[in-house]
Image (cartoon, grey):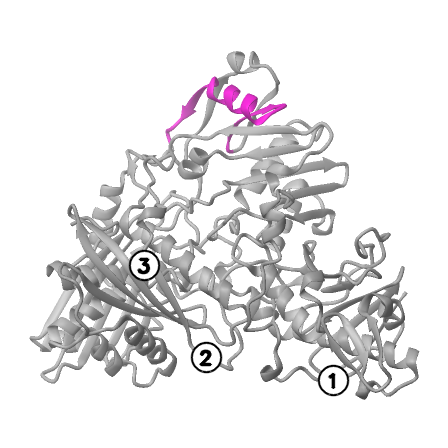
Amino acid sequence: MGATMRVSRRDFLRTGAAAGGLVIAVQLPGCGPRGAESGAEGGAGAKPAFEPNAFIRIGEDGWVTVVAKHLEMGQGTYTGLATIVAEELDADWNKVRVEGAPADASRYNNLHWGPAQGTGGSSAIANSWEQLRKAGATARAMLVAAAAQEWGVNAAGLTTDAGVVTDPAGGKRAEYGSLAAKAAKLPVPENVPLKDPKTFKLVGKHSARVDTRPKSMGQATFTQDVTLPGLLTAVVAHPPRFGATVKSFDAAEAKKVKGVRHVVQIPTGVAVLAESFWSAKTGRDLLKVEWDESQAFTQGSAEILAQYRELAGKPGAVARKDGDAEGTLARVSRKVEATYEVPFLAHACMEPMNCVVRLSKDRVEVWNGEQLQTGDQMALAQAAGVKPEQVSLNMLYAGGSFGRRANPKSDYLLEALSVAQAIKGNAPVKLVWTREDDTRAGYFRPLTLHALRGAVDGSGKVTAWHQRIVGQSILTGTPFESMAVKDGVDGSSVEGAANTKYAIPNIQVELHSPALPVPVQWWRSVGNTHTAFAVECFIDELAALAKKDPVAFRRGLLANAPRHLGVLSLAAEKAGWGTPLPAGRARGIAVHESFSSYVAEVAEVSLENGRPRVHRVVCAVDCGIVVNPDIVRMQMESGIAYGLSAALFDEITLKEGRVEQGNFDRYRVLRINEMPRVEVHMVASDAPPTGVGEPGTPPIAPAVANALYALTGKRVRTLPIRL
């Protein structure tokens, strides 16, 4: 049974009672209508008791289960979401656990995205902050009311802490589990007050990650751990060139491999299904496939860049225009121009793409590290000829993503479905991509070119900035196109450039979005990955032209951007900017805003055997209220390591249309002995929390490049860095 009543104009609290527990969900504007009621696990050893449309579930054993609508892929989302709930609930952190929510945008949508469920854009904590605080506070109020009713006292005199309600005057205490059933039968209170941040016990403090133990003990379930009766593993032979298709294939040798059960053609290639991964891969490698390459892409990276350089000499779609940059540049003499180039990049997740699909007559069931529930649910439903509500997505842990699992075209999920359909749903299918599959046939960060021109006046002030960006559009041709591509400008291609906060009177940013059959999608921090590199390196070039210190120069341009200034000044101070360094070392700095968070980084660099060596990185971040400082620190360190790999080593290159890299022998990532010492400093703030998963990545490449200029006098304008 359940009860629903109005709380305020902004939100609705929902409660239900069954089998001795309490379940609460909060819906804010955009969350949509109530979903259908169904069972959910009530607590350790408890019978199924509650509907899954719940962010909080409290069992008679006192365990608090937080249902997370966002994917945990290593970034700490489960811990952050649980911390928000536990803070307002006054829960015992040692009795809090998290489980992934089902795919249902009517109840678990991302409030920053409208009626869609998914994880990305560093939005998990930001969009859940108010929603989960209200859920926790309401649950606490109901537990207190239940205790007051049971003891016949005034609720105002009761206190809560670590999962216990206490009556200081009467000397009574009750654990939450013993009160849950009674609390669930009470009316939902209106306008429950939230805590004063000054009283926070968990938010802003150290809390152990909720996923550390299950991952360390091998108890966490990833896609590779899923086993179902009759499950077959599928490995697919993909075309060696984009746009090629299967002309014919010979599976005779593949079928001789012990355990191989089926060899089937699907839209993306030829799939081998077997009783184990190794049998499937062995069979796949023995296939003889003749490819039809009449429509295949045969250009290499060099040819693409040549075309991009030609395009950069022509006007593009205007993303921003203030003043008259072209006219100013034509009139002045103190100016500089530069071209910056970045390559295609793979996501290189620790866990390559995989997915389990089981078909029945009127249902599609999926198990995977699910990042884009609504988009994938709709795509699978359309391909299977069922309604979206007939597609269930079981969200498991994911071993990294960096954007890859949030594919706008649902590529690997649809491939898994096509394999299951090819065998008429006679067995559940676990699709597994090898590292080489994901590197060669996956989706990439677009190769991009930036052509910049800028000018300074006699006093060293920037008078003009002209930037022309050339790179594939990620969002054109996807369901997001109507929202994110305006007047020929893909917002994800120009973010970090068109919205720069540097105060420049004459600024123009243009975009060319050439169409190529090379598949591209977002990569950790999306457009900011390349715009920060170009913008922050070019700012240093203008500082040199103006004969000013790079930090002082930026401060002058950011006088009206206090949060940029805050991280810039903090990073410079903590890094000892301007103080002497050992011989052979130099510092470089960069500051960038992405996903409403502000990050500045100072890199301390030397040369070892002609190669850059990064010894120290000082990072300052302003991400609003810090929910868990350890996770913020981890994510800044992670973003820096990921960005350093791209700055120093990573690139996907094409030769005659074929990807030249396959595994980590050719797609080199940062090694542990190459990781610099990283210091993370957080700006104290009372602003709502913003993202930390992506903003640490953009500033590191320009900070290193700027340090190398200070060290060698040579500009770095191409990544990965080659001196």
Q: Secondary structure at mark 3?
A: helix
Position of residue 570 in the picture relative to residue 254 (left or right): left
On the image, the x and y values in percent for residue 205 come to 55, 71
Earlier along the polypeptide chain: callout 3 or callout 2?
3
The answer to whether residue 149 is magenta is no
Circle 2 packing at 10 Å, graded few (<14), some (14-19), many (20+), is: few
> In the image, which residues are magenta?
268-294
In the rendered image, residue 228, in percent from the top left (x then y), is placed at 71, 33
Q: Which residue is mark 3?
A: 530
Q: Is residue 33 above or below residue 478?
A: below
In the rendered structure, the answer to whether residue 192 lies left or right of residue 321 reads: right
Q: Amino acid at mark 1?
A: Asn
Can residue 437 be seen by looking at this rendering? Answer: yes
Q: Amino acid at mark 3?
A: His
Q: Earlier in the sequence, mark 2 or mark 1?
A: 1
Q: Residue furthest left?
A: 333
Q: Which mark is residue 684?
A: 2
Residue at point 68%, 34% (across, down): 227
Name which residue lies at 48% across and 65% down: 632
Q: Is residue 73 above or below residue 230?
A: below
- In space, the residues marked 3 and 2 are separated at their CA atoms by 29 Å
Q: Is residue 283 left or right of residue 603?
A: right
Could you give the CA–CA distance between mark 2 and mark 1, rounded to whole angstroms? 28 Å
Instruction: Give the SS element for disc 2.
Output: loop
